[in-house]
Image (spheres, rainbow, N blue to C red):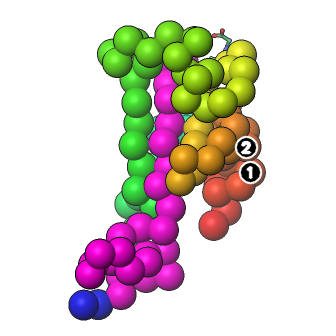
């Protein structure tokens, strides 16, 4: 079993990413696209596993999104890290843009 890099942790006999980023967004949303792009960069760098969830495609409306994030969601994207609320693209870029 080889450790991939500092972003991986042992889990059930194998290595998995320590960071799982979940992005809730919609098409035609520039901030969602920026979050998606940053997520793709982090994933390509082997730093995180990223899941992008299209709210329209999945039929998730605002109350449902707020139930998921546990707080008001006046804007999109809404982003979680390991199930914990992070914020929107601005917070994602600030926290993870330079890692
Ligand atoms: N500060 C937020 C801004 C996000 C934002 O303004 N998103 C737009 C869509 S790209 C939005 O949700 N506007 C209000 C709306 O669509 O109801 C962030 O960094 O994510």
Where disc 2 sits, the SS reads helix
Instruction: Say which residue appears at 40% left-offset and 23% top-offset.
Output: 54
Which region of the structure is painted magenta?
A: 3-32
Instruction: Say which residue appears at 61% left-offset and 32% top-offset.
Output: 69
Question: Regarding ligand 1, which quadrant of the image does it lie in?
Answer: top right
What residue is disc 2 on?
A: 91
Give x and y (percent) for residue 33. Answer: 50, 30
Q: Which mark is residue 69?
A: none
Give x and y (percent) for residue 15. Answer: 33, 77
Whether disc 2's CB lies below 8 Å from ligand 1 is answered yes
Magenta segment includes 6: yes
Where disc 1 sits, the SS reads helix
User: Callout 2: 10 Å neighbours few (<14), some, many (20+)?
Assistant: some
How far apart are the alpha carbons under marks 1 and 2? 5 Å
Q: Quadrant of the C terminus?
A: bottom right
Q: Are marks 1 and 2 in contact (CB under 8 Å)?
A: yes
Magenta segment includes 78: no
Instruction: Say which residue appears at 24% left-offset and 90% top-offset.
Output: 1
Instruction: Say which residue appears at 48% left-offset and 68% top-offset.
Output: 18
What residue is disc 1 on?
A: 94
Does residue 80 appear anywhere in the picture?
yes
Give the side of residue 54 with respect to residue 92, left or right: left
Give the side of residue 19 with respect to residue 73, left or right: left
Does residue 41 appear anywhere in the picture?
no
- How many numbered discs, if any? 2
């Amino acid at each position: 079993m080889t450790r991939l890099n500092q972003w991986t942790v042992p889990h059930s006999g194998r290595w998995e990413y320590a960071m799982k980023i979940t992005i809730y967004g919609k098409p035609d949303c520039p901030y969602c696209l920026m979050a998606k792009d940053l997520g793709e960069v982090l994933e390509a760098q082997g730093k995180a596993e990223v899941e992008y969830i299209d709210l329209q495609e999945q039929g998730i409306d605002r109350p449902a999104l707020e139930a998921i994030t546990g707080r008001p969601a006046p804007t999109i994207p809404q982003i979680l890290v390991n199930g914990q609320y992070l914020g929107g693209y601005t917070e994602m870029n600030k926290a993870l843009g330079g890692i």
